[in-house]
Image (cartoon, rainbow, N blue to C red):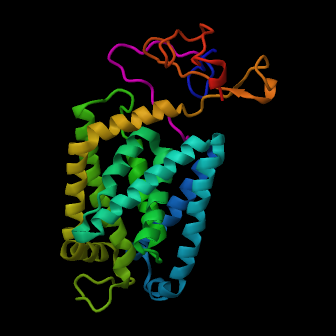
Amino acid sequence: MTAPGAVGTGSSPGPAAPGRARPAVRPLRWSPRSMTALLLVSAVGVAGFGWPLMASESFGAAYGAHAPWLFALILPLLLAVLLAAITEHGAGAKAVAMLGVLAAAGSALRLLGAGTAGLQPMFFLMVLAGRVLGPAFGFVLGAVTMFASALVTGGVGPWLPFQMLALGWFTLGAGLLPAADRLRGGGEVLVLAGYGALASLFYGLVMNLQGWPWIAGMASGISFVPGDPLVENLHRYLTYVLATSLGWDVPRAVLTAVLVLVAGGPVLRALRRATRRAAFGAPARFDPSEPGGADRPRRTARTNPADGSNGSGKPAGSGVSDCPSPGCGP
């Protein structure tokens, strides 16, 4: 039984270069359709987050009546991005299963924190999963995890699409960090811990923009004033962040960095091992000589890039099956 080549290509991978990590295997990849949907929903999201800093007085006064329409626009666009990313390139059951497992784990971690003092352990898992599984899977995972955890914790409301989009950006950013196939060990963990801390602060900064205009009865020094110059409203907003939410954002950032430093190495290895074993994108082979002929798929062995052998230690392409008996096939 011959082993498939590199995922998604069909060519045989050569031995891994000494000191180099194995090439990353990504369960989802960007396509023109999914990228277009992501750019569209991101543009709408940026407008939804940033309008208080640029709105005129008349728009700011009337926005309250139109806010539900923004909610109704962002949520379908997010769903379109998720469907485009999952259906494009034929994401199989293994990718969907991994998405479900990680989203469930993230929801459980959110329950542990329960939002107390901004402590949300699920952010550290999003950093590590985005790093290993790539930006496309990361964005989908972040949005799905926030949606599922909101259902579990009762956090469904007009803010939910903004949270889904912000956490999607958060996890996507982890997948875009450089040297994904080269940097390993303590250096990688330090980079991810730094990113987790900074991105957690940025997440809080962005989410505050969504709720700032609706805070009523506050001192004029930190309240949103429709139509005021950008610099003045920006100053009010930063003062509002320092006065109200920094005590939540900093603990979230510190907890994320500490969890990455403590558990990042083992979790990264476990995610990479699961990704290799899943063999995303490995083609199904059909062997007419087996019972059932061409209608019966035959399992293929995964190739170890280090030595060119399959998972059982036999050379790839040797024709030797991994099955110890005729009945162990699929």
Q: Is residue 17 magenta?
A: yes
Residue 206 found in image quarter: bottom left
Taking the spot 45% from the left edge, 88% from the top edge, the residue there is: 61
- Residue 188, compared with residue 250, is above or below; it is above
- Looking at the rendering, in which quadrant would you find the N terminus? top right
Taking the spot 44% from the left edge, 50% from the top edge, the residue there is: 102
Residue 28 found in image quarter: top right
Whether residue 24 is visible to the viewer of this picture, yes or no, is yes
Q: Position of residue 170 (x, y in %)?
A: 38, 54
Q: Position of residue 326 (x, y in %)?
A: 66, 19
Q: Name the dominant secondary structure of the magenta segment.
A: loop
What is the magenta range?
Answer: 12-30
Q: Nearer the viewer, residue 45 or 132?
A: 132
Marker count (numbered):
0
- Looking at the rendering, in which quadrant would you find the C terminus? top right
Taking the spot 37% from the left edge, 81% from the top edge, the residue there is: 213
Q: Position of residue 159 (x, y in %)?
A: 44, 74
Whether residue 25 is visible to the viewer of this picture, yes or no, is no
State left or right for residue 26 relative to residue 255: right
Q: Position of residue 241 (x, y in %)?
A: 24, 72
Q: Nearer the viewer, residue 195 or 107?
A: 107
State left or right for residue 62 relative to residue 184: right
- Residue 13, compared with residue 42, is above or below; it is above
Taking the spot 55% from the left edge, 34% from the top edge, the residue there is: 280
Q: Is residue 175 magenta?
A: no
Q: Nearer the viewer, residue 196 or 40?
A: 196
